[in-house]
Image (cartoon, rainbow, N blue to C red):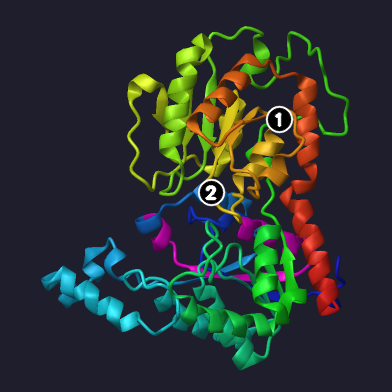
Amino acid sequence: MPTPSDRKHILYVAWAFVPLRATGTANSVAAVNSLIERGHRVTVLTADTDVADLILGADWSEANRVNPAARIVRVRQYAGALDTVISRWTAEQIANPERGHRLIREAVEGLFPEPVNNGWYPAWVAPATATASALHRQDPFDLVIANILPAAGAGVALGMTESAGLPLMLVERDSWVFNTFTGRPYDDAAATRPVLEAVMDRAVQIWYINQPLADLHRREFPAWADKIRAVPNGWDAANLPDQPPVTQPPVTHPPLTQPPSHPAQQDSHPSSLTFRYVGTIYRDLPLDLVADAWRQARAVSPLLAASVLELSGPVKQWFQPDPADGIILTGPVPKNQLAELYARTDGLLFVLPEGPMVTSAKVYEYAASGLPVISSLPPGHAARAVLAGRPLWFDAAQHSAAGLAGAFVAAAAHRPTASEAATARAMAEPFKREHLLARAFDDLEETLGW
């Protein structure tokens, strides 16, 4: 813990922050909390709440997880055609929406080399940078940490390092230049790469969410390879049901007055099970493979024929399951209800798009749940390293509908024991987000000489 004289004031730039339901929000919250627990002062620069409440979706339950010592400063994100408040539209938009929206796109093109989404991210850079500069004049910062998902955060970071000479740390959770599903550069990489190189040159460290992503950027940017770190997302204990400490011997025969947490452990011969996918339902998710596999599994297992597969998360890709198949869309789940959701789940479905650098934050939470995990992952998939050796992992023998169906059937036939669940949780303990961040910030402070 720093002494009062060693306390630093850190500007944390995170366009996606509470209450926005978006990739990276939880990790930014955890990082801010970790810095405050280390004794530092943190100012968070983020987008206004209209982005969450009116456009992309909000989860206000996560607000309770932010350390109250954090100072949160919000800068309005000009939404352009995405603005749902029509009274804020320009006269041109109202008179001719198609032409008005085109003019907006043309106006913001060139403001910052990030794909323009109807006047979306690039329009945030200038006002956010001006706000950060004003805050620095009032109460100087010692360090800028910029989450550059979206990449507009890099524009703010560049502005602050150029105008104020502040040290910079980048959190590039995925990749601005490379497609994580293919490993190949995006079509606009010629425009984005020089800007990324500029911020990498000024940064003291750059964090990526997994080792394959870190290795790719070390190969592509050898001049800054020594700055690059792999800092996984990890899991939060608050998202999971209360469990015995992992250091305690597993309870194999709980008293009748204290039944196990999960339905599958309460009855050695259940009449039905609830399998669940937790997370965003998006375009690249192999939904057709999942539906085919579930139908095949139900056709050969009477237990699965009486069971359900619930998909719990925001739907960003049209998917209409047949009710007769026992697949149910339950919608988004607030963070403060996740523990209860896991407590009434018998098995977790883990599927991802094919890609050499894709992991997903949920794999860590799944691993720590102590529940059976059913997966279909291509050989060499980055997420395999998290589940490797874990009991209660039922991986498809082949990355196919038939392979995933076999994994469902095997999981349904298995009766999880308390010992298996305890071992699974213990194996996931090193991936606890607070542990990962503590080690990462130890390394950062050593690099900075703090």
Query: Residue at left 72%, top 51%?
Result: 433
* Of labels 2 and 1, the one closer to you: 2
Residue under label 2: 354
Image coords of residue 152 (percent x, y): 49, 75
**Residue 240 left/right relative to 446:** left
Nearer the observer, 80 or 225: 225
| Picture quadrant of residue 249 | top right
* Towards the viewer: 142 or 111: 111
Image position of 143 with respect to 301: above or below: below
Name the image quarter holding the C terminus: bottom right
Q: Toward the viewer: 169 or 303? A: 303
Q: Which residue is mark 1?
A: 370
Residue pictured at 51% horizontal, 47% vertical: 353
In the rendered view, tell whether residue 444 sits above or below residue 253: below
Residue 70 locus on image (x, y percent): 64, 65
Q: Is residue 394 left or right of residue 156?
A: right
Residue 296 pos. (x, y %): 46, 21
Element under disc 2: loop
In-image side of 280 versus 221 (left or right): left
| CA–CA distance in space, label 2 to label 1 | 25 Å
Using the image as rendered, state which of residue 292 and residue 171 is in the foreground. 292
**Badge 2: residue crowd in 10 Å (few <14, some 14–19, many ≥20):** many
Residue stretch rendered in magenta on the structure: 27-53
Residue type for callout 1: Gly
Q: Is residue 440 visible?
A: yes
